[in-house]
Image (cartoon, coloured by chain):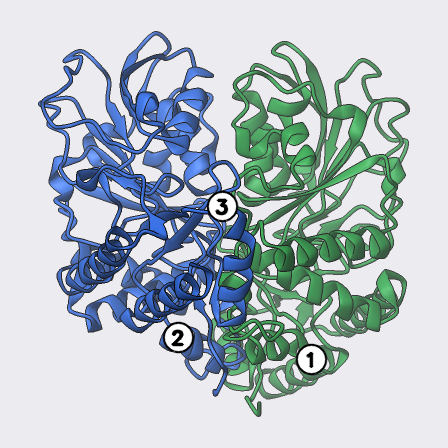
Chain colours: A blue, B green
């Protein structure tokens, strides 16, 4: 293939490794010499069962997931888990603690409240307009909470926790949609990790759930079968037809992560990419980043132009230069460069070069 | 591409038109000259919003969906709708009527019962081991039911309704997963139609819901946001990130259906395919089909060998001849040839020729 590829800074669905896309394209009509696409084979056939098992094994290996955690490939994205988690883990009247850091934690809060759960908002970064995360030790958690929920990386605000909240015996639940596979994670510190796949794990339409096995099996009777963890775990996520193409592509993406030195290797690349971009922004009078330095995301770098009247021209000229999807979320405006795993260093360098050029022409 | 393609009789995920796969493969790294895959672009960007709108418009045109019906592209497959439908349409204590014709209606029944709904099984084809459908006029429906649910085509048993149940003012709800787009359907006779996409509409991971607008907006407060119809309809199925690749492929498949003369043209081809296969089976002493002639599916043709000891050899030799996935469902055994829209007539002819050859060699 000789496609001219864009440097795509979309927040999700997002850039995927070119090698993965080329490999998928090459076998889209004939997978493993079967004369069939991977999309066309039964999820219960030997070939696909092996493919799904390989994806799970690779994920366990890459993330270091202990055996006492189940790995589930579900539908409904992270938003589906906003309801599935309270349905699976709580009874009506239970209390949960939430660290509120932006629009995604807000959604997790409002959905949990549908289920008669007493949602205690332990910290709320509203005062900083969600440009901060709470410092470790600055808040007190409820030792009787059923779980503590937080969002390690907020895609919209571009803020991130750079520590794991200490919750004692209370299970910690994390929406890792926009940072999973971007750096090493000590899974054993969590009760449940979930992540929509459309950022670092492939196309949209799937949610990976990693859940400590002792937390399963207590779902409310009205939990929809498609998100009841224990049934799904007992059936290798195939109680109903899973999103087979997503599972297959995740396997390829994990192999690509391995080729980059695993999450350790990827993390090093990611940190260097983010550091270069933040350094350039901080040194500039033309651009600025509103996020507290210790809360800056490695995945989603937000920035604003000193003169917002130039925003449209910036986005349009960047697009023309092959740097796509740089407009910030419609709710916050400004710019956002999502620099997920699949964004090469060259893409970040090209962005910085473009920003410098744009600043010079418009200063 | 010059892949050697199998004739794939899988019940789902299932065969897709080769033209669709080739077209998707050709643009998998560069869609519409964007330098990005369709899987990599934001669902809220202009290009994908237009793609989704085009898919919906094509579906409305191909199926003749009236304006007073919403079209939703949801996650969770048909199994997800087994819970979503009672959550959206009923209150606890409501009564619904179900025509029970096999394993799929059984799942719809047991999931609905989770929600405090009084599920009245109006007819149950157990006596025939689910090889029949109830005759029109042979049963009485409850005029006070909230809705009537039926499964026009049962994938596992290979049985189908060849009439639309008359339900008066009671909304008719149909799981069309394994027959949607295979023949014309008068949508106005239904309150709600739903279909997992992995048979006639593309890969797994999506469910199309076609719902009369007046039935929306009455969901129980605990309905998960990702399946609450009115919110999804108001947001063009983009309240959260939709399965973008599935929406894109469905659009291509609908264009392919149009090229075959729409559902009318496809239905003619489908009926001829099924008739040829049933005729051969009926004329044979070696094979037989257990389904009542007026209840035979046009999509899933089941058959058994007079000598079941030959089953394994049949499946293996068929596979070697490029006729794949002919084993019946693990719960019923025997054989099943799923001959969805994308199975060409040549595939059915090749199957019949193989069956004749196998019979001759083993008689």
Horizontal and vertical percent position of residue B264: 90, 62
Which disc is residue A308 wearing?
A: 3
On the image, the x and y values in percent for residue B340 come to: 70, 65
Which mark lies nearer to you, 2 or 3?
A: 3
Residue drawn where x is 27% and y is 50% of the image: A180
**Is residue A353 left or right of B38 when viewed as pictured?**
left
* B106 to A338, vertically: above or below: above
Q: Which mark is residue B347?
A: 1
Q: CA distance from mark 3 to mark 1?
A: 61 Å
Q: How many marks?
A: 3
**Disc 1 sits on a residue from what chain?**
B
Disc 2 designates what residue?
Answer: A18
Contact flag, marks 2 and 1 (Cβ < 8 Å): no
In terms of secondary structure, where does tag 2 sit? helix
Q: Nearer the viewer, mark 2 or mark 1?
A: 2
Q: Can residue B278 be seen?
A: yes
**Disc with the residue nearer the chain's start (2 vs 3):** 2
Q: Residue furthest top?
A: A93
Q: Is residue B340 visible?
A: no
Residue A204 versus residue A29: which sits nearer the camera? A204
Which chain letter goes with mark 2? A
Name the residue: 35% across, 51% down: A287
């Amino acid at each position: 293939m000789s496609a001219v590829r864009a440097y795509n800074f979309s927040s999700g669905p997002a850039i995927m490794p070119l090698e993965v896309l080329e490999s998928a394209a090459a076998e889209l009509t004939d997978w493993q010499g079967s004369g069939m696409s991977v999309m066309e084979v039964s999820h219960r056939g030997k070939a696909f069962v092996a493919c799904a098992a390989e994806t799970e094994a690779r994920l366990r290996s890459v993330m270091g997931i202990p055996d006492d955690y189940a790995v589930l490939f579900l539908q409904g994205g992270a938003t589906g888990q906003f309801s599935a988690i309270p349905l699976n883990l709580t009874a009506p009247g239970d209390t949960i603690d939430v660290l509120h850091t932006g629009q995604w934690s807000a959604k997790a809060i409002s959905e949990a409240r549908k289920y008669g759960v007493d949602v205690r908002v332990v910290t709320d970064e509203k005062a900083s307009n969600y440009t901060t995360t709470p410092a470790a030790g600055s808040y007190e958690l409820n030792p009787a909470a059923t779980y503590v929920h937080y969002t390690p990386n907020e895609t919209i605000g571009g803020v991130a926790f750079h520590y794991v909240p200490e919750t004692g015996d209370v299970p910690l639940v994390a929406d890792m949609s926009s940072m999973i596979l971007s750096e090493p994670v000590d899974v054993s510190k969590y009760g449940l990790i979930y992540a929509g796949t459309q950022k670092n794990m492939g196309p949209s339409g799937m949610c990976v759930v990693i859940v400590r096995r002792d937390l399963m099996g207590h779902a409310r009777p009205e939990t929809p079968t498609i998100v009841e963890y224990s049934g799904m775990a007992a059936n290798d996520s195939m109680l109903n037809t899973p999103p087979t193409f997503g599972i297959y592509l995740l396997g390829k993406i994990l192999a690509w992560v391995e080729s980059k030195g695993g999450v350790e290797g990827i993390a090093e690349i990611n940190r260097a990419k983010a550091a270069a971009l933040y350094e350039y922004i901080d040194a500039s009078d033309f651009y600025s980043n509103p996020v507290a330095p210790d809360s800056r995301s490695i995945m989603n770098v937000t920035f604003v132009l000193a003169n917002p009247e130039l925003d449209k021209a910036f986005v349009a000229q960047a697009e023309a230069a092959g740097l796509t999807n740089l407009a910030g979320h419609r709710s916050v405006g400004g710019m956002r460069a999502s620099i997920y795993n699949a964004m090469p260093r060259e893409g970040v360098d090209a962005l910085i070069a473009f920003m410098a050029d744009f600043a010079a022409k418009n200063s």
